[in-house]
Amino acid sequence: MSDETPLIDTIADMTAESVVRANLSPEVLMLVRLAALAAVDAPASSYVLNIAAAADTELTLEDAQSVLVAVAPIIGGPKALSAGEKITSALGLMIATAVQAELEAEAQAGGAADDT
């Protein structure tokens, strides 16, 4: 565990252990996790971590929407809508981060080309 990020490291360790012990397919595991995040009205940052993992599966945005439709009667409309907004925010953050990383890589590559 890093001295700089003990909370993130602990959450990552807990998540990894739960994945090993869950005995679910990656797709089902991600759908269950999405339903749980919606039920507890998790922050957008929690969705970022799980969306990144879900990207390695064959899940679609329609699958995520179907989960929210399925749990809405149980968790309530406001929490389901809140989850949809947070998923949208998480996706936007992930796209912005990827674009920023790409721009920085291009700037570094351009700087390296200028040095030659």
Image: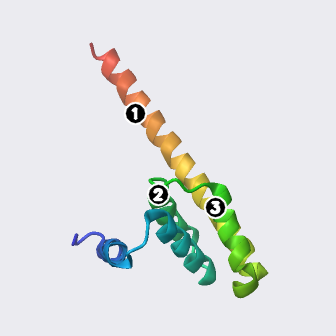
Residue identifier under label 3:
63
Q: Assess whether mark 2 and mark 3 are in contact (beta carbons under 8 angstroms).
A: no
| Closer mark to the observer between disc 1 and disc 3 | 3
Marks 3 and 2, how far apart in space?
15 Å
Above-or-below relation of 65 to 57: below
Measuring from the top left, give residue 52's x and y in whole percent: 47, 57
User: Mark 2, residues whose alpha carbon is within 10 Å: few (<14), some, or many (≥20)?
Assistant: few
Q: Position of residue 10 (x, y in %)?
A: 31, 77
Q: Tag 2's secondary structure? A: helix
- Measured in 3D between alpha carbons, the distance from the residue under mark 1 to the one under mark 3, in whole angstroms, is 33 Å
The residue at 33%/17% (across/down) is: 113
Q: Amino acid at mark 3?
A: Asp
As helix, strand or loop, the secondary structure at mark 1 comes to helix
Depth order, front residue of 94/38:
38
Say which of 56 and 83 sits in front.
56
Q: Which residue is labeled 1 in the image? A: 105
Q: Quadrant of the N terminus?
A: bottom left
Position of 23 with respect to 67 (left or right) is: left
The image position of residue 32, as x and y in percent, is: 53, 75
On the picture, is 106 further left or further right than 77? left
Q: Earlier in the sequence, mark 1 or mark 3?
A: 3
Q: Amino acid at mark 2?
A: Ala
Work out whether residue 98 or residue 67 is closer to the camera in this orientation and state it.
Answer: 67
Toward which corner of the image does residue 24 lie, by quadrant?
Answer: bottom left
The structure residue drawn at horizontal position 30% and vertical position 76%, both measured from the top left corner, is 17
Sort mark 1 into few (<14), some (14-19) or many (20+) by Cα contacts within 10 Å.
Answer: few
Circles 1 and 3 in contact, beta carbons < 8 Å = no
Identify whether 77 is placed above or below 99: below
The tag on residue 52 is 2
In the picture, which quadrant includes the C terminus?
top left
Is residue 42 visible to the viewer in this orientation of the structure? no
